[in-house]
Image (cartoon, helix red, strand yellow):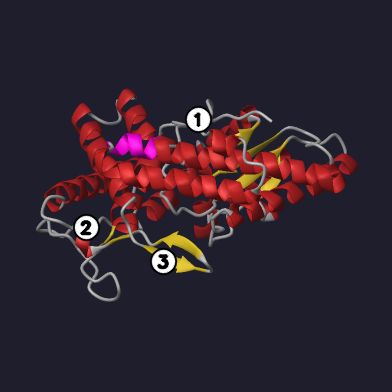
């Protein structure tokens, strides 16, 4: 299958013939990157880490295809694309991100062919997800994962499902639409993935009620900065004195720029790419774009220093920045970045409520 992530740079990953060497390659790659983190610019650190994740996932897909072939189901019967959502789709994963994924495959000519395709790709998806769990990627808690039949479908069925989300703008369906907006093909037929994303953007234009629901969802998480510019840190528990950098800084900016980009028809999935595209389209001034980029890069780098927890034998990121990381050197820059995030949230709320005729 086609590998859309481009040049491969990890021979130990590319040549891994099983899960144990692949898991070891991941651990080595991440240890090397962790050692370099203090001296790396944030954007370079994120690019290198996400390229490492992509390479691991691509190798898992190749191993999964081989395993399914050995089981007697052969090669993929039609083209398909393996999709990443969440931080993977945005190329913003941390050291310990979970799996958010989906699979889309080409339409069949008849029901018998469709049943064959469905059986093959469900088996492939289940194998790939199990393999990724084995090398340290826990499954998405919300079950947005390729092994869930609701996220592993033909292009026709995917199109029908997206149409259903638009037709019934419940909170859950709008959440699914926002997840779909971050979808990125990491392996397979990129053109198939583009057609799927085209259906999403084509349907959005005629549904102002969806935009209103998206706005409500987008503003759910507030930036953790007080009216006097103080950090709103955790008061109790293991992380007392620390900051929820994921939901109090990173996610609010992800949500804001996703909504602005979707509203403008921008198909870029990374937040930094969306900021650049919005600036190019005239939706952000030079000053706004630069402030946003600087703030978001800081949030991305701080996410790499958040604490982890052991769950079912696997390390899982908590999204919480320990109090020990809130040094006198970092706090002023963090306060400035949070104020920028707060300003962006207000901008989104004001602009979209004006367009939608709200208060």
Q: Earlier in the sequence, mark 3 or mark 2?
A: 3
- Name the residue beneath numbered marker 1: 9
Q: Earlier in the sequence, mark 3 or mark 1?
A: 1
- Does 293 sit left or right of 90 as displayed? left
Q: Residue furthest bottom?
A: 237
Q: Quadrant of residue 143?
A: bottom right
Tell me, yes or no, whether the two marked residues, 3 and 2, touch with CB atoms within 8 Å.
Answer: no
- Measure the C-alpha gap from mark 2 to mark 1: 32 Å
Q: Secondary structure at mark 2?
A: helix
Tell me, yes or no, whether the two marked residues, 2 and 1, touch with CB atoms within 8 Å.
Answer: no
Crowd class of label 3 (few under 14; some 14 to 19; many from 20; radius 10 Å): few
Residue that appears at 44% across and 37% down = 262
Residue 159 visible? The answer is: no
Looking at the figure, which quarter contains the N terminus?
Answer: top right
Asked if the magenta segment contains residue 201, the reply would be no
The picture places residue 343, in percent across and down from the top left corner, at 21, 46
What label sits on residue 309 in the rendered view? 3
Residue that appears at 38% across and 32% down = 273
- Does 303 sit left or right of 290 as displayed? right
- For the record, the magenta segment spans 41-47
The picture places residue 330, in percent across and down from the top left corner, at 16, 50
The picture places residue 155, in percent across and down from the top left corner, at 70, 38
Residue that appears at 45% across and 32% down = 268
How many numbered discs, if any?
3
- Name the residue beneath numbered marker 2: 325
Crowd class of label 1 (few under 14; some 14 to 19; many from 20; radius 10 Å): few
Asked if the magenta segment contains residue 45, the reply would be yes
């Amino acid at each position: 299958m086609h590998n859309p992530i481009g040049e491969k740079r990890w021979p130990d990953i590319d040549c891994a013939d099983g899960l144990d060497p692949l898991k070891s390659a991941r651990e080595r790659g991440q240890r090397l990157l962790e050692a370099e983190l203090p001296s790396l610019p944030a954007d370079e650190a994120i690019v290198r880490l996400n390229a490492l994740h992509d390479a691991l996932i691509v190798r898992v897909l190749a191993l999964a295809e081989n395993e399914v072939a050995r089981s007697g189901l052969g090669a993929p019967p039609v083209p398909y694309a393996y999709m990443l959502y969440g931080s993977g789709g945005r190329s913003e994963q941390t050291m310990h991100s979970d799996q958010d994924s989906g699979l889309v495959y080409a339409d069949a000519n008849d029901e018998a062919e469709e049943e064959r395709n469905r059986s093959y790709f469900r088996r492939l998806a289940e194998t790939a997800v199990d393999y990724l769990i084995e090398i340290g990627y826990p499954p998405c808690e919300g079950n947005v994962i390729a092994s869930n039949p609701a996220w592993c479908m033909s292009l026709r069925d995917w199109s029908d499902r997206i149409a259903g989300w638009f037709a019934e703008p419940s909170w859950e369906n709008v959440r699914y639409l926002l997840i779909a907006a971050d979808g990125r093909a990491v392996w397979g037929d990129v053109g198939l993935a583009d057609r799927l994303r085209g259906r999403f953007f084509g349907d959005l234009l005629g549904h102002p009620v969806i935009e209103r629901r998206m706005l409500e969802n987008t503003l759910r998480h507030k930036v953790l900065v007080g009216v006097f510019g103080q950090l709103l840190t955790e008061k109790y528990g293991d992380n007392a004195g620390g900051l929820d950098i994921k939901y109090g800084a990173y996610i609010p900016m992800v949500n804001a720029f996703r909504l602005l980009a979707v509203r403008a028809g921008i198909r870029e999935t990374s937040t930094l790419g969306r900021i650049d595209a919005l600036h190019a389209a005239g939706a952000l001034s030079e000053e706004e774009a630069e402030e946003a980029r600087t703030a978001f890069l800081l949030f991305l780098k701080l996410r790499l220093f958040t604490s982890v927890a052991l769950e079912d034998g696997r390390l899982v990121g908590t999204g919480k920045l320990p109090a020990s990381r809130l040094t006198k050197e970092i706090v002023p820059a963090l306060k400035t970045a949070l104020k920028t995030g707060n300003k962006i949230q207000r901008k989104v709320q004001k602009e979209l409520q004006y367009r939608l005729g709200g208060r």
